[in-house]
Amino acid sequence: MRAPHRWRRPAVTVAATLTALTLGTGIASAGQDGWGRPTPGSDGGGDSYYPQDGNGGYDVSDYDLKVTYAPDSHQLTGLQTVYARATQSLSSFNLDLKGLTVDSVKVNGLPAKFSRTGDHELVITPRFPLLRGLPFRAEIAYHGIPQAIEDPNLGANGWQYAKSGGAFVAGEPKSATTWYPVNDTPLDKARFHLAITVPDEWGVISNGREKGTYKTAAGTTHVWSEDTPAVPYMTTVAIDKWTFDKRQRADGTPIVSAFAPGTPDSTKQADARLPEILDFLESKFGKYPVDAAGGIYLAEPIGFSLETLSRPIYSGRAGNVSTIVHENAHQWYGDTVAVDHWKDVCLNECFASYATWLWSQAKDGQDLDARYLKTVAAASDQFWAGKLYDMGPGNEFTYVYSKGPVMLHALSKYLGQAAFDQVLKTWNGLHHNGNASMQEFQHYCEAVGHKDLQGFFDAWIYGNGKPAPEYLYPGDLKPANG
Ligand SMILES: [Zn+2]
C-alpha cells in the first residue's frame, strides 16, 4: 500500500470417503478418538489488532466465486464455493461477510443452517460435523448491494463505486469481506477463481490469468484465475470501460494492464516500464514469485494504491514509476510472503519503500548514503517517535514509509552489504506462499550475517527514539557534518 500524503495526517488511532482419507493422510495415527469432540470454530483469526477478522478451525485452499453484477442497480448476486480442510473437528464454523444477504448454504452438498452475528460473521452449522483433517466444501448463495468499510485514515476499503458507473475493490487490512464470504485473515491464503458476469459493454480485470469470456443471458462472463495463493485482501475485481495492454515477460509470464477512461499518457508511459521494473526487482529479491503481472489504473483519486496480487491497483493520481516499483516490490514483500500479524507490517512497507531507493540508485545514479545522511540530519523528533514493530492498530501505515527505508539502509551497513543483499534475495524463497514475523526476519539476518542484531533491532524497530551512534552510523556512514 502506498498513500504518499497520508503520513502528514494524524494517526487514528466432503467429497472424499473416510476410508480413502484414512489411508491417504496422516490422520490414521490420530487414533480412536483422534478427531476430538466437534466444537464451534473460533469466530476470529487471533490477530492482536483485528481479532475478529478471519476465523479458526479450517484452512481454505480454493475460492471458486461466481458473481453477476449490474452496474445500473449496483446489485451483486454471488455463489461462492469454498474448498477447505478442517484443522479441528467442527460442529460449526464461521466465514466473514460484511452486509449482503445470504440466501442459502450447503456443506458437502447438504443444506446447512446459518446465522449472522456481530459485525461480519456468517455462522454455518453443517448437518454432520466436519472431522479434523478432512476436506469439505461450502457453497454460499448471496446477494445485495456491496458497501465499502469506512476507515478514518484511508477512506473507503473494499467494494467501491467509480464515477464512470463501474466498480472496483481495494482495501487493507480487509476488503474481500465486502463482496464475498471469506476467511479474511493473512494467515489463510488460497487460490482465487472468479467468473463475473456483467453487461456486454463493461470490461473486467482481476487477479492472475485470463481464462476467457463467454456469453450468457445476463451479459458476458469473464473468467480469471489466480493460482498463486492469495491473502484475501490481495484479491480484487474492477469493472469499467477499460483499455487493455497485454504483453509478456521474457519468460512468458502474462502481463495485463487496464487503464480507466481518461488515464493520462504519463501513466501509460510509466506502466510501459513494468517489464524493466520486474526484471530489476527480480535482480534484488529473487525470482518473480507470481504467475501473472500487470496493473489496474483507476480514474478515481482514492487515498492509496494497493499491492493486489499479480496486478496492483493504482489510485488515479498515482500512476508513476515510483509507485509502480513500490507496489510490485510487495509481490515479494507482503503478498507471497505475508505478515504473520499486522504488527509485522514493516515486513511489507519498509521493504517496498526501500525498493524505490534501490531503483533510484540503479536507474538515476542516486547516492543512497548521501540520501540516508541527509534524511537523518534533517530528521525531527517526530521522525524518531514511532516504532517499526507493534505500532498499534491504526498506526500501521505511518512510520514504515518514512523511518522504514532509512532503517533498512542502516541495516545494510550494520550487517554488511553482501549479507544484506543475500537476505533480500532469499527471504521470499524461504517463506514463499507463507507468512513471517519480524522476529523471524531478525533471526534470518543474524544467521546469514553471523552477527547478533538484538541491539540494532531494539534501537530501530522494536523501540523508538533516535538510535545510538553505533546503530545510526554503522559501517562507513559518518554524520553529515562530522
Ligand atoms: Zn505499500
Image: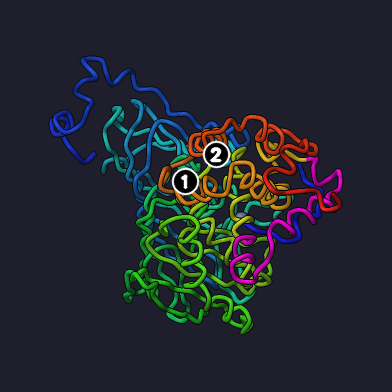
Is residue 67 within the magenta segment?
no
Please say whether residue 340 is visible from this viewpoint. Answer: no
Viewer-closest of 119 and 320: 320
Query: Would you say the magenta stretch is mainly helix, strand or loop?
Result: helix
Q: Residue at x 74, y 59 (%)?
A: 371
Which numbered tag is attached to residue 427?
A: 1
Q: Residue at x 74, y 42 (%)?
A: 472
Q: Secondary structure at mark 2?
A: loop
* Left or right side of 404 for 178: left
Q: Secondary structure at mark 1?
A: helix
Residue at 33% from the left image edge and 41% from the top image edge: 84
The tag earlier along the polypeptide, 2 or 1, is 2
Label 2 Cα neighbours within 10 Å, binned few <14 / some 14-19 / many ≥20: many
Q: Nearer the viewer, residue 435 or 262?
A: 435
Pointer 1 local density, CA inside 10 Å: few below 14, some 14–19, many at least 20: some
Q: Quadrant of ligand 1?
A: bottom right
Residue 19, image x, y percentages: 13, 30
| Kind of residue at disc 2 | Asp
Span colored in magenta: 356-385
In this picture, residue 283 sits left or right of residue 217: right
List x then y, in percent, for residue 198. Answer: 44, 72
Q: Nearer the viewer, residue 356 or 163?
A: 356
The question of residue 381 being in magenta is answered with yes
Residue of label 2: 53
Q: Is mark 2 within 8 Å of ligand 1?
A: no
Q: Position of residue 228 (x, y in %)?
A: 38, 54
Taking depth in this image into account, of 441 and 13 the one nearest to the observer is 441
